Amino acid sequence: MRYNDIIYSWDVLNEVIDVEKGDEKGFRLSKWYNICTEDVYEFALRQMRQASPSARLFFNDYNNESGPKMEASIKYLSKLLDAGVPVDGVGIQAHWYYNFPDEKIIRDAIEKYSALGLDIEFTEVDISVYGWSEARDKKDFFLTRPEDRIIKQAKIYTDLFTIASEYPAVKNITTWGVSDYHTWLDNFPVNNRKNWPLLFDENNKEKAVVAQLINAGNSK
């Protein structure tokens, strides 16, 4: 298979769980699922193991760090593992907010997924300066960067990196972009509303949190 010598992991299953709009089993009603049922997911994982035997195979999703979606994900992953289906890790997309999640939620997610024997990666990480309900409010915009929330955002980042370093099961943290110059959150869920969710600012300069993370890493 092309790139087998350089690709260390594949997101084989991405966003297949939907406990709000899915079916009674909690699966997203995608075209693949509607036509092939959940059998297509097992098939995909087994085929990928044959095609790329040395790569780590991941189940990746958002909002799977807590609540019903985490429980549905754990239930399904347990089912796959019990059936001998090759799945090596879970990706937590971590599209989070300046005030969510707290340390307990992060630790609980790591501990529950790692108890299954799975690797964990925090993927697509960004920390919005808006809260959950504010994120969908089309009326109120920050016209300039809210420094008080940047400080709180830094705490979420610092908590994530610090906590992750304590658990061998956590293998990687990847941000969903590099700088605040342009991010997908500038146009989602509200078009043309500036967000500042990443570790580098609009001028591609590091935020204060970067030095905090480096110092924390050097102290380990």
Image (cartoon, helix red, strand yellow):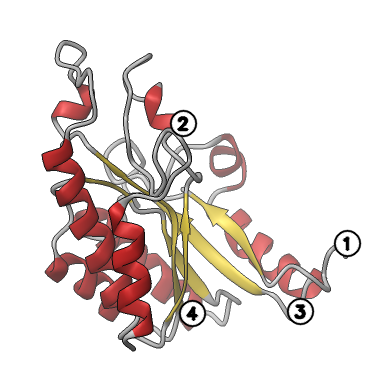
Residue 54 left/right relative to 180: right
| Direction right: furthest residue | 2
| Residue type, label 1 | Arg
**Residue that appears at 67% across and 60% down:** 44
Do residues under tags 1 and 3 come within 8 Å of each other at their CB atoms?
no
Question: SS for tag 4?
Answer: helix
Dot 4: within a 10 Å radius of its alpha carbon, few (fewer than 14), some, or many (20 or more) residues? some
Question: SS for tag 3?
Answer: loop
The residue mark sitting in front, 4 or 1, is: 1
Do residues under tags 4 and 2 come within 8 Å of each other at their CB atoms?
no
| Residue type, label 3 | Pro
The percent coordinates of residue 192 (x first, y second) are: 37, 14
Gap in angstroms between the C-alphas marked 4 and 2:
42 Å
Q: In terms of sequence position, does the residue under pointer 2 or pointer 1 come before the other?
A: 1
Question: SS for tag 2?
Answer: loop
Q: Is 181 situated above or below 141?
A: below
The percent coordinates of residue 119 (x first, y second) are: 47, 78
Circle 3 is placed at which residue position? 53
The residue mark sitting in front, 2 or 3, is: 2
Image quadrant in which you'd find residue 86: bottom right
Gap in angstroms between the C-alphas marked 2 and 3:
39 Å
Q: Is 139 situated above or below 55?
A: above
Circle 4 is placed at which residue position? 81
Q: Nearer the viewer, residue 63 or 142?
A: 142
| Residue type, label 2 | Tyr
Circle 2 is placed at which residue position? 181
Question: SS for tag 1?
Answer: loop
Q: Nearer the viewer, residue 3 or 176?
A: 176
Gap in angstroms between the C-alphas marked 3 and 4:
17 Å
The number of discs equals 4
Q: In terms of sequence position, does the residue under pointer 2 or pointer 3 come before the other?
A: 3
